[in-house]
Image (cartoon, rainbow, N blue to C red):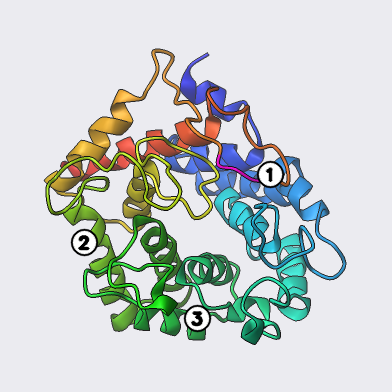
Amino acid sequence: MTALDWLLDSDPAIRWQVMRDLTDAPAEEVAAERARVATEGLGAQLLALQALDGRWGDAAWNRGWDSTMHVLWLLREMGLDPASTEGQHAVGLVRDRVTWQGCGPEECDQNRFFVGEVEPCINGQVAASGAYFGQDVGALIDRVLTEQLPDGGWNCEAPQRSTHSSFNTTICVLEALLEDELATGSRPEVTAARLRGQEYLLERRLFRRRSTGAIIERDRKSGASFARFGFPAWWHYDVLRGLEHLRRAGASPDARAADAIDLVTSKRRADGRWLLDVQHPGRMPIEIDDGEGRPSRWNTLRALRVLRWYERTGS
């Protein structure tokens, strides 16, 4: 079985993206497969776990990674159609019933879910899902715009007056800015901030120190390696996630992305698949892959389409 056949022999959440991004299937066939995410497999399993109060994991956000925010992150990555009846119902419950009470700073307790809280890392993830699912996150986007640091990125310690950006927070905010542009159209200030954030990544060749060019072996906060690919990534940055953002943004990567592309290529196994290098700590609401150290359909899908995008740019 080829890697492509292996990907197609899987869940609708993966299969429809393979059809769109790797096989160039007709749009109507892609749409029909995508529609199954709401009613079959992983997507349907996640939707079925939502409580009547709109929450997953009894919380807007938690450190167990099975909360409302984390499930919406997964549903966005799976490509649940925002226009589907199931998607609109689930997100409507979140919008109308979920607050941040007990999940963040006390001053945010009464905030509706899509209003967010104070950390740009968390707010980026909330805004990305909100924009994707058609919710009004304009105020949240405006907030993170004010928190962009002089080096072009963001840091979750912005409330404590951090002056240097982190890869982790920057990628979370960049994904939010891009989802906002895709959903509502480009605003000059949003596009400009996103491009400055992308430059932050490219100046560091996606995993190197700007000052010395040395590879960043471990993230200062989590100890995770940017060269080990995890899915779901949650708030963690890695090279594959950075490249995926550039691909989705339609960027034309220059030579500064070459090292990152070489890293992705080097991790391809003889059977054409990529492993799940790391499964980040926490309780998964459902299992979506075969486990750490095993071939990963999600990483294989993402790696293949990143390489395809890079090759097609002519870089």
Residue 283 among magenta residues: yes
Q: Is residue 96 above or below residue 256?
A: below
Looking at the image, which is closer to me, 106 or 186? 106
> Could you tell me residue 164's position as x and y percent?
28, 67
Amino acid marked by disc 3:
Leu
> Could you tell me residue 34's position as x and y percent?
62, 48
Residue at 37% across, 47% down: 219
Question: What SS does tag 3 mark?
Answer: helix
Q: Is residue 100 left or right of residue 158?
A: right
Q: What residue is shown with label 3? A: 140
Amino acid marked by disc 2:
Glu
Would you say the magenta stretch is mainly helix, strand or loop?
loop
Among the two numbered marks 3 and 1 on one chain, the one whose residue lies closer to the N terminus: 3
Looking at the image, which is closer to me, 211 or 95? 211
- The quadrant of the rendering that contains the C terminus is top left
Please report contact status of discs 2 and 3: CB closer than 8 Å, yes or no. Answer: no
Can residue 253 be seen from the camera position used here?
A: yes
Amino acid marked by disc 1:
Met
> Could you tell me residue 239's position as x and y percent?
34, 43
Residue at 45% across, 67% down: 176
What span is in magenta? 280-284
In the rendered structure, find residue 34 and report the number of the disc placed on it. none
Bin the neighbour count of mark 1 within 10 Å (Cα to Cα): few under 14, some 14-19, many 20 and up.
some
Among the two numbered marks 2 and 3 on one chain, the one whose residue lies closer to the N terminus: 3
Question: What SS does tag 2 mark?
Answer: helix
Q: Is residue 159 above or below residue 231?
A: below
Bin the neighbour count of mark 2 within 10 Å (Cα to Cα): few under 14, some 14-19, many 20 and up.
some
Among the two numbered marks 1 and 2 on one chain, the one whose residue lies closer to the N terminus: 2
In the rendered structure, find residue 284 and report the number of the disc placed on it. 1
Residue at 47% across, 30% down: 277
Q: What residue is shown with label 2? A: 199
> Could you tell me residue 141's position as x and y percent?
45, 79
